[in-house]
Amino acid sequence: MRFQLSEETEMLRVAVRAFAEKELAPFVRERDERGGVDRSVWGKMAVMGLTAIPLEEHYGGAGGTVLDYAVVLEELAAACPSSAAMLAAHTGYAVWPIRHYACHNGNGKFNSRLAALAEGRLLGGFAAPPMDEGSLIAVPDGLLQGGYRLNGAVPVAVNAETADLVIMFARIHRQGGQRGRLTAFVIEKGMPGFHAVPGAAKIGLKGFSTGSLHFDNCRVAWDTDQLGRKGQGRAVAASVAEIGNIGAAAQAVGVAQGALSAAVDYAKTRKQFGKLISRQQGIAFKLADMLTQVEAARLLVYQAAWRMSEGIACTREAAIARNISAQTAIAVTLEAVQLYGGYGYMKEYSVERMLRDAKCLESDFATGGMELASISSILTGPTD
């Protein structure tokens, strides 16, 4: 077994790292303090060709592997976690399900949507399937043959009000008020009766949009807006579980690596009692432990991403990778803050932001409210 990335993937890593250090890193603190999404960042990533890494070239993508995608997210997150989260939500939760549940049927509107998403002309978002069966319903619309009227709200959506289109789920209303099965839809910004509301301010990932979606007699058509078959919403949601967990895990590794690199650089310049703290055994041991955790988490992410690239089942591996990577990001960024001493709590230094970003990646904000890292759900199986 050869434990190394291909030459092409290594070249991609080098290019994305240079892009992130030049275009993203210099303005991270400014974006964090200002809050809100900087759409110009999205434009830069589109020019770089990062907006559809694992999508086939004939659909407009880069034709890369899921492992390539994980490496890209890792490098972006090391410099700017919010930008990485925006890309992960777009690729994993919008591009991926449209590719697998719409474009094979030759639907021209879905094909054009996918091309626009792949090229970065559109930014995709995702809303979690409603837990409350009455929170969002779709009623057959007599004025729109084969269509529905959406009413209700979805409390958690990623890329939320910044997205040009959103993948969301509703229960089809049956006669007599019977509980219907979930069906997936693609909703475009500007549709009458649809609006997105920004969420409450977060402690981290402040340049990544999360919010809620509200529907008031929003009309959708089954042939151009329904994703997959009627009642297939649970399968559509499940289709993003693996790539969603891999994406979140890669971001967590990137944040941990960023904190480790910052801590090492600081330790090489900070002196105490006339001696660099990097030469103090206690600090050296801490840095070694941090490196060990990052490398272990990275290997779990790469294993899951490689399995998915090869078409091998990876639901368990992807969830485990996310679980461990999230814990690693918290542990490593916290150690970095401690290593900086009092400076670690100051906004002038990046590690306090990294800790806040890591905490958000640990939460379900990173996966559209789906809490996909739950190992227990793998053991017990999904329910509808």
Image: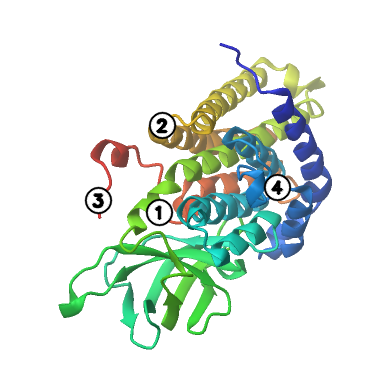
Q: Could you give the CA–CA distance between mark 4 and mark 1, rounded to whole angstroms?
A: 23 Å
Q: Nearer the viewer, mark 3 or mark 1?
A: 1
Q: Is residue 269 above or below residue 170?
A: above
- Residue beneath label 1, please? 236
- How far across and down, in percent of the image, does residue 157 sit? 48, 63
Outermost residue, front side = 106
Mark 2–mark 3 distance (CA, rounded to whole Å): 20 Å
Quadrant containing the N terminus is top right
Callout 1 secondary element: helix
* Disc 3 residue type (three-letter): Thr
- Give the label on residue 194, or none: none
Q: Nearer the viewer, mark 4 or mark 1?
A: 1
Q: Judge whether residue 207 can be spotted in this image.
A: no
Disc 4 target residue: 50
Outermost residue, top direction?
Answer: 1
Q: Residues within 10 Å of mark 4 (few under 14, many from 20)?
A: many
Name which residue lies at 59% across and 33% down.
67
Number of callouts: 4
Q: Which residue is mark 2?
A: 313
Residue at 47% in and 72% down: 213
Residue 283 appears left or right of 160:
right
Instruction: Identify the disc placed on residue 383.
Output: 3
Which class describes the residues within 10 Å of circle 3: few (<14), some (14-19), or many (20+)? few
Which one is nearer the viewer's eye here, 146 or 167? 146
Amino acid at dot 4: Leu
